[in-house]
Amino acid sequence: SCYKLLLSENHSVVKTSSCYDMDTKLLSLLHLPVKDPQDYYSLGDIVANGQSLDGRILNVLAAVMSVGEPKYFMTSDKRKGQRCEVKLYDETERSFPIVCWDNESIQLAQSWIPQETVIFASDVRINFDKFRNCMTATVISKTIITTNPETAEANVLFSFIKESAQSGAWHDTVKEQANNSTNLETIVDVYTVKQLKEKALQSDGKLDPLYGIIYGSISTLDIDENVSKVVRNRCSICRFIVSEMSNTCTFCSDVSPEAKSTFASFDILVDVTDHTGTIHSCYLSDCVAEETLGCTVHEFLMLEEDQKTALKWQLLLERSKIYFKVTLSPNWRTGMKVNLLSCKLADHVEASQILLGRDW
């Protein structure tokens, strides 16, 4: 557009239009990028140009591979901050990070559906991340993101992600993204079971995802009984657990039955116990379960019953360092859903120093 709208803090007023007064023809404009739809860099071009683009403001058209959890932090001057990292991909690059810092873009990102949503992000800042040795994009104050743009270029990308999903070409990448979406090094807060339960009770139903560490043990691990309670089938496209009866995914309704497939994945409920109490029905699943048990699903299914029992007792009641994520879930019988992010045998010296050094 050759027009610009200038707003003055002293002389301008902006009001949200009522849904009854809205011109419905304007709604279609929400899916049109504010920049020329052909004026964008592919992710492969950004990576190929490397540090020569450091600090540049560019437009990006890409699909969403995964959306990370919002992370909250305190700045050195005691201001609260937040960030959310989204992994993008296109025909030229399998994984490219874009970081959101403001509340509006973080909320928008939480609505995106991995491997279905396409975005046109105008005026994002490109930087070279020295720590990770890769190129990244950052949402800034002038960035405008158009979700699922209605352009010829976006339609080509839509076709690509649908074909990739049906062929399962991105399954390994999605699995890797899910496994790496939480950086354990950023989790440092140590809790007891009692403290965790109290925090959930005091939250008044408004608890943000809580990450922390418990030095405790797995007190229930029924992996040597009914295998259906240990291994479940997931859809290779969306990764949702599929019905045991039909063995088909009800979420990917637009995908032909011939293109659908499933894969076996750990899905185990365990109890976690320390000296203050027990949390029942915690999720130990997928890649985290494989790392904890020290075997893949296929290797586990090949074990004899006595071997499964021996494996169980290698972990059961052993002092472990357990990383977790807690979200409130009224439908969950404990009122909160606990996902284990890592569970490894604890260093006894480290655990003793931390537990003895705290006033529980």
Image (cartoon, rainbow, N blue to C red):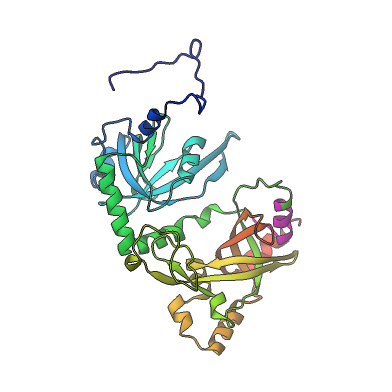
The quadrant in which residue 194 appears is bottom right
Residue occupying the point 30% across, 36% down: 59
Q: Residue at x 54, y 80 (%)?
A: 227
Whether residue 141 is situated above or below residue 65 in the rendered picture: above
Visible residue check, residue 47: no
Q: Position of residue 69 (x, y in %)?
A: 51, 49
Residue 280, image quadrant: bottom right
Relative horizontal placement of residue 171, taking residue 303 as reference (left or right)? left
Q: Is residue 181 visible?
A: yes
Residue 241 colored in magenta in the image: no
Q: Position of residue 42 (x, y in %)?
A: 26, 44
Q: Which quadrant: the N terminus?
A: top left
Depth check: 156 or 350 in front? 156
Which residue is drawn at the image coordinates 41% and 70% (left, top)? 262
What range is drawn magenta here?
A: 190-200
Which residue is found at the position 55% from the left and 38% from the top?
Answer: 81
Q: Main structural element of the magenta stretch: helix, strand or loop? A: helix
Above or below residue 145? Residue 211 is below
